[in-house]
Amino acid sequence: MREFCKKLTFRIYPSLYYAIRYRTSDNIDVDFVVIDTIVLCGHTLDGLMDKIQNFIFSSSSAPDGSVDKIEAEKQWSWIENQLKNSKYEKIS
């Protein structure tokens, strides 16, 4: 199994959050900001892979809050800087 996992390069991420620049065939640059929502806001009931009946009958599916507040703040700052410093048109 370990050898198989080594070949799955599509599952290797450079960081918990990162930016990707993609150039279309029309020569338009598009930036994607990839984030880790678990670090930002914690798990939701469905993200915990709990029993389906617990999810269906739950009174809330709101995230339970970040476990690591310092890491969450670092990520929020990074997101804000990515958006603030982007030189491209933004979709609103």
Image: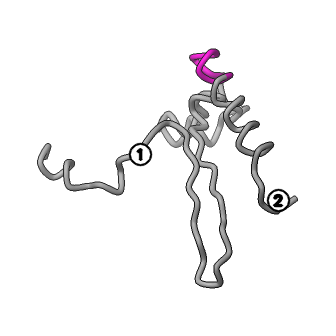
Q: Secondary structure at mark 2?
A: loop
**Residue at x-position 51% and y-position 43%:** 52
| Three-letter code, disc 2 | Lys
Q: Secondary structure at mark 1?
A: loop
Left or right: residue 25 compared with residue 90: left
Colouring style: one colour
- Expressed as whole percent of the image width and height from the top left, the position of residue 81 reads 73, 37
**Magenta part of the chain:** 65-73
Residue 70, label in figure: none
What distance separates the C-alpha of mark 1 from that of mark 2?
25 Å
Quadrant of the rendered structure where residue 71 is?
top right
Quadrant of the rendered structure where residue 17 is?
top right
- Foreground pick, 85 / 4: 85
Quadrant of the rendered structure where residue 37 is?
top right
Question: Are the residues at dot 1 and dot 2 in contact (C-beta closer than 8 Å)?
Answer: no
Q: Report the number of discs.
A: 2
> Is 21 placed above or below 52 here?
below
Left or right: residue 14 compared with residue 82: left
**Residue at x-position 62% and y-position 42%:** 56
The quarter of the image holding the C terminus is bottom right
Q: Label 1: which residue? A: 13
Q: Label 2: which residue? A: 90
**Callout 1: 10 Å neighbours few (<14), some, many (20+)?**
few
- Foreground pick, 39 / 22: 22
Q: Is residue 68 magenta?
A: yes
- Expressed as whole percent of the image width and height from the top left, the position of residue 53 reads 55, 40
**Residue at x-position 61% and y-position 34%:** 44
| Three-letter code, disc 1 | Tyr
Q: Residue furthest right?
A: 92
Left or right: residue 46 compared with residue 8: right
Left or right: residue 17 compared with residue 78: left
